[in-house]
Structures are given as C-alpha cells and as structure tokens.
Image (tube, helix red, strand yellow):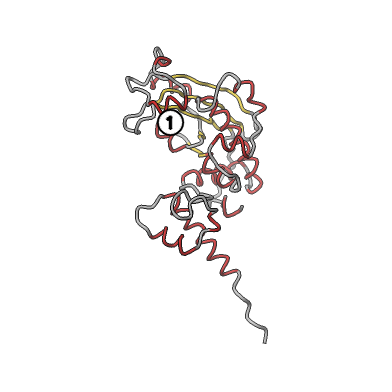
Amino acid sequence: MTDLFPPRPSTLPLFPTDAPTLVRVIDVETAGRRIEEDAVIEIGSADLDLATGQIGNPMQTLVDPAGVEIDPHARRVHHISDEMLVGAPPFAQAVKPFAGAAIYAAQRAEFDRSRLRLPGRWLCTYRLALRAFPGVRAHGLQSLVKYLPLDLSDVRAELESLHPHRALYDALCTAVLLREIHRTLMPRCSDIADFLERAEKVSAEPALLTKLRFGKYKGIPIGEVPPDYLEWLVKEPGMDADAVFTARHHLDRIEIRGVRAAPMLPVL
C-alpha cells in the first residue's frame, strides 16, 4: 500500500501550523452537454471534519441553467426536469453559499471543479478510492457504497428523502466515502496535514487503474497484464492518460522487484 499512497516531499515549516480538518464534499448535476455548452442545474454539499469524522451542514439548491435544455440521457439519470428549474436562482447566486471552503472534495473532482470554478484545494475521492481500496470490483460511487460496503447510517435520515444521482444524495455518500478513505490511509501518514498533502497529489495525477478499460486485456487485473503489452501501451501515441500512467507505475514496480529479486553471488 505504501507505493499506492506515497509521501510527498515537502519543506518543514519554520513555525508549527494547524492543518485544516474541514472538507466541503460537493456534487453537481448538469444539463449533460459538452463542457463549453453545459450548465449546472443542481449543487449539493456536506462538510466532513476529518478530525472527528462528523458529517454536517448539508446544503442543496437547484440552479437556473440560463436557457440550456437538459439532455434526455442526463434527465433519465438525475430525474431533474426543465420545469423543476423554473424560478431557481442563477448560477452566480446559487454557488455563493458553497464558496469559501479551504478544501473541497468530489467523486470526480475534475468534473465538479471545472463546473463550479471554486478556488481552494481539491481532492478526488475516485482517484483516492483506487489507492485505498484497489481490490474492490468497481470504483464508481454507488459501486463503492455497495461493495465496500459503506456505512451510511449516520446520514440515513437525510438520504431517505433523496435518491442517487441527485446532488445532495451523492455529496453525502461521497462524504462517507472520504471518511472511510481517510480512516484507511491515515495510519500511513504522520498527521492530517501529511494526509492532505498526499491526497492532493494523488488527486492531481491521472487515475491509477486496477484494470484496463479497453483492448485485448480489458477487465483483466493490471498485475496480470504482460509487461510487453504495458510497454507497447506506454509508447503508443494518443493513449488514455490513466492507462499510460497505470502502465508506467506497474512497469516501475516490476523493475524494482526484479532488482530486489536478483540472485546473490555465491560465497567463495
């Protein structure tokens, strides 16, 4: 596990500082268009205190999409209709209550961050879950709820009036997921500041996949993919960034194991 959540080199501060422990876990639902044409239609969040594990301050709002129609496929997923958005606040107003956090987290942080454009540190629970729980069969949010499984008991009351793929429902589940990620990975860290440094680094990197998502070895655990195929994948132009990053990581591990496994010279 150490190489899946490596320490991040840093300079020790001259004076001790208290690391923030509150993370605003956030989720957005959109009209389902390409990013340059898309519109946020719902925002939901919950705050997780990493020091205590408590989840609170749930917030949610619908958002006026400013004339952007909801894609039919997106509507089937989140069940938000154009009619439900009549009278909702515009994005600039709707996003204000969610602003101001030092740290944000989202299941697919790159997606949510690009839509919300909120400044701060961002953690990606999808990429972190791949490091914390590599053996789980799938790492989508609802798959993790089912297969870890996640204990949702302390947010159950809020979830009862919601359903999956609505912003607050997913934000609450993601907060529970981040709490479990923190519980799993924290023993490898010196303190919360160290955890956050490592988590932010992992969140900024491509995803370290457990299985390839395409090709002749699609769905095969990455450790069972032949090294020559991984070498080809790394060299092939236009390959998926997550796949290339994963292939390089495993090739490096194979090389390290090979060095360590070198036979000892006989004693003369």
Residue topped by disc 1:
118
Kindly give the residue lying farthest to the top in the view shown. Answer: 87
Q: How many marks?
A: 1
Q: Please provide percent x and percent y for residue 107.
A: 51, 36
Residue 188 against residue 113 in the figure, above or below: below
Quarter location, residue 216:
bottom left
Kindly give the residue lying farthest to the bottom in the view shown. Answer: 268
- Residue in view at x 60 percent, y 53 percent: 2
Q: Please provide percent x and percent y for residue 38.
A: 35, 29
Badge 1 marks a residue whose secondary structure is loop
Q: Tell me if 92 is positioned left or right of 45 in this view.
A: left
- Residue in view at x 38 percent, y 52 percent: 239
Residue 158 against residue 174 in the figure, above or below: above
Q: Please provide percent x and percent y for residue 18.
A: 59, 37
Residue 253 against residue 268 in the figure, above or below: above
- State the residue in front, 220 or 90: 220
Quadrant of the image containing the C terminus: bottom right
Q: Amino acid at mark 1?
A: Leu
Q: Tell me if 72 is positioned left or right of 223 in this view.
A: left
- Residue in view at x 61 percent, y 70 percent: 261
- State the residue in front, 250 or 54: 250
- State the residue in front, 152 or 267: 152
Quarter location, residue 143:
top right
Q: Please provide percent x and percent y for residue 9.
A: 53, 52
Residues packed near mark 1 inside 10 Å, few (<14), some (14 to 19) or many (20 plus): some
